[in-house]
Amino acid sequence: MFGYNVHNKGRGGSDGKKKTPERGKCECRSHCRSTGPPVCGSDRVSYASACHLFVRACLLAKKGILLRMVGEDACRKRSPCEDLRCGPGEDCVVTQKDGVLSAQCLCPTSCPSYGDSGLHIFEF
């Protein structure tokens, strides 16, 4: 697998005695040697290669978080409004800062006029 290395340690063997195998220990890789075609992870992040995704997946697996490859290409950019639920009358507004898209729900600054927006004061 791309994301980890297995280190097997055992006792004996070099002095002519029978080697006793012990359980191997998996360690996550810290880097990848090459880049390949980009891949898309289940976290919607584009990784430089499958190796890079597997390195991240190995580290997350130790925390109980599952990361898998969902596409053999960079992730499709999607609107941040897809993850946001605005209230009645609010609009989702997308902004971009330093190449990062973000969204927020905002109330309109003005209302459409239907001829009924005049102020009526009644005195009793």
Image (cartoon, helix red, strand yellow):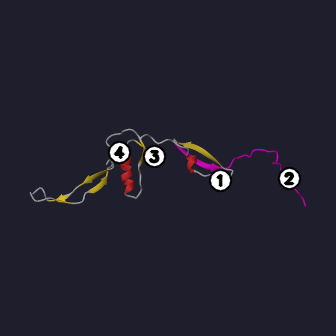
Q: Examine the residues drawn in magenta and state their main secondary structure.
A: loop
Instruction: Look at 79% across and 45% down and name the residue there.
Output: 114
Crowding near the residue tagged with mark 4, few <14, some 14–19, many ≥20 C-alpha atoms within 10 Å: many
Q: Is disc 3 in contact with disc 1, using a CB cutoff of under 8 Å? A: no
Which residue bears the numbered disc 4?
51
Task: Kindly identify which numbered label has been placed on residue 10.
Answer: none
Spatial CA span between label 3 and label 1: 28 Å
Q: Residues within 10 Å of mark 1 (few under 14, many from 20)?
A: few
Residue 123 on image: x %, y %? 90, 58
Q: Kindly identify which residue carries mark 1.
A: 87
Separation of marks 4 and 1 at Cα, in angstroms: 42 Å
Toward the top, the furthest residue is 37
Residue 103 in magenta stretch:
yes
The earlier-in-sequence mark between 2 and 4 is: 4
Q: Quadrant of the C terminus?
A: bottom right
Determine whether, in the image, residue 74 is placed left or right of residue 4: right
What's the residue type where badge 2 is placed?
His
What segment carries the magenta color?
100-124
Q: Secondary structure at mark 3?
A: loop
Q: Are marks 3 and 2 in contact (CB under 8 Å)?
A: no
The residue that mark 2 highlights is: 120
Q: Is residue 45 left or right of residue 103?
A: left
On the image, the x and y values in percent for residue 83 come to 56, 50
Q: Earlier in the sequence, mark 4 or mark 1?
A: 4
Task: Locate residue 121 relative to residue 45 in the image: left or right.
Answer: right
Q: Earlier in the sequence, mark 3 or mark 4?
A: 3
Farthest right residue?
Answer: 124
For marks 3 and 1, the one nearer the N-term is: 3
Task: Out of 101 and 88, give the one closest to the viewer.
Answer: 88
73, 55: nearer the viewer: 73
